[in-house]
Image: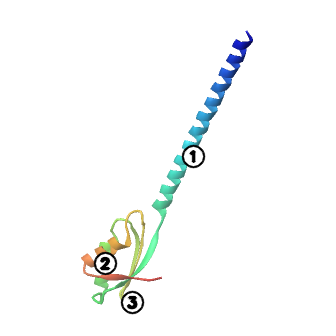
Amino acid sequence: MKKIFVSTIIAMMAMVCSENIATAAETQGQAAEISNVAQKKEMKNKKETKVLKLSANIHCKDCAKKIQENIGFEKGVVGLEVSVEERTATITYNPAKTDVVTLLAAMRKIGFPATIIEQ
């Protein structure tokens, strides 16, 4: 009888322990999932800004308008300011969606080759 009683208690303790382990693993999995969602959200909201020195062929407001209309709608671009006087374009973009190499290629494609001004 003692053996059955002890065996029953040990079996019950094993069940409780396995439930605790399963609950802990589930909680850890949920925490990892929340962390992944937070990281994705952070990347989605991250922004970088680069100042580009434009080629000499930008000379009027129509040139600036052409840049704004074409580059402003590139995937990932969230802000764009063009200065004809300084021959610069300040681009703010989401690095999760685009990169500066892609933006430079787009500038070159519309006829305004540019280089990055180190900040």
Identify the residue position indicated by label 1 in the image: 31
Q: Do the residues labelled 2 and 3 touch (CB within 8 Å)?
A: no
Q: Residues within 10 Å of mark 3 (few under 14, many from 20)?
A: few
Identify the residue position indicated by label 2 in the image: 67
Identify the residue position indicated by label 3 in the image: 86
Q: How crowded is mark 2: few (under 14 residues within 10 Å), some or many (20 or more)?
A: many
Residue 109 appears left or right of 3: left
Callout 3 amino acid: Glu
Q: Residue farthest to the top? A: 1
Residue 119: percent from left, percent from top: 48, 82
Please identify the quadrant where the N terminus is shown.
top right
Mark 3 vs mark 1, CA separation in Å: 50 Å
Select label 1 or label 2 by which is in front.
1
Pick the front one: 101 or 73: 101
Q: Residue farthest to the front? A: 3
Q: Residue at x 27, y 88 (%)?
A: 57
Q: Is mark 1 on a helix, strand or loop?
A: helix
Q: In this view, does 12 lie above or below 113?
A: above
Pick the front one: 37 or 71: 37
**Of label 3 and label 1, which has the lower sequence position?**
1
Q: Which residue is drawn at 44% across and 83% down?
A: 118
Q: Do the residues labelled 3 and 1 touch (CB within 8 Å)?
A: no
